[in-house]
Image (cartoon, rainbow, N blue to C red):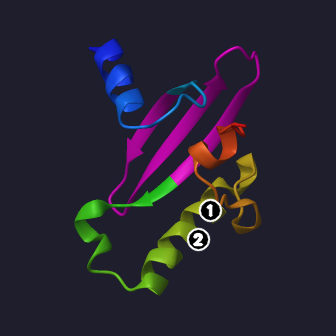
Amino acid sequence: PMQEILDGAVAMGFSFNFKISKSCHIYRLPECTLVFYNVREEGSDKEDFYIEIEITEETVHELTEEQALDIIRKYEKILEPVGVTAQKRMRRSLFEMYRKDIK
């Protein structure tokens, strides 16, 4: 099936850009989910690490933006000893970080 997917993507005009391997450790808490990612780009020995704080899907629609941000800030504070801070908050997706310029 993998080759069929790749062939279908090419047929739709997509071209290969990069390949990463990602492993996740997921911890579900009452108000959010913490996801710890290890990411390695194919052909590289370098491994990157990320932490995602995601508001629980079942309740996010009931919160104001400020309430949701308060939950994120709460867990950033808890995770501060391992380097998680609002100042280091990522604004880009994995695609944006790993994509290659195709010429």
Work out whether 43 lies above or below 101. above
Foreground of the two, 4 or 38: 4
Foreground of the two, 95 or 69: 95
x 27%, y 76%: residue? 61
Q: Amino acid at mark 2?
A: Arg
Residue 80 location (% of width, % of height): 71, 57
Q: Is residue 100 left or right of residue 1?
A: right
Tell me whether the residue at label 2 lies in contact with that at label 1, contact meaning CB atoms closer than 8 angstroms. yes
Q: Start and end of the magenta stretch?
A: 23-52
User: Which residue appears farthest toward the left when viewing the image?
Assistant: 58
How many labels sit on residues? 2
**Residue 73, numbered label:** 2
Residue 98 location (% of width, % of height): 67, 38
Magenta: predominant secondary structure element? strand
Q: Quadrant of residue 38?
A: top right
**Residue 76, numbered label:** 1
Residue 28 location (% of width, % of height): 36, 47
Q: Amino acid at mark 1?
A: Glu
**Residue 62, numbered label:** none
- Quadrant for the N terminus in the image: top left
Work out whether 19 lies above or below 63. above
- Quadrant for the C terminus in the image: top right
Q: Is residue 66 magenta?
A: no
Q: Secondary structure at mark 2?
A: helix
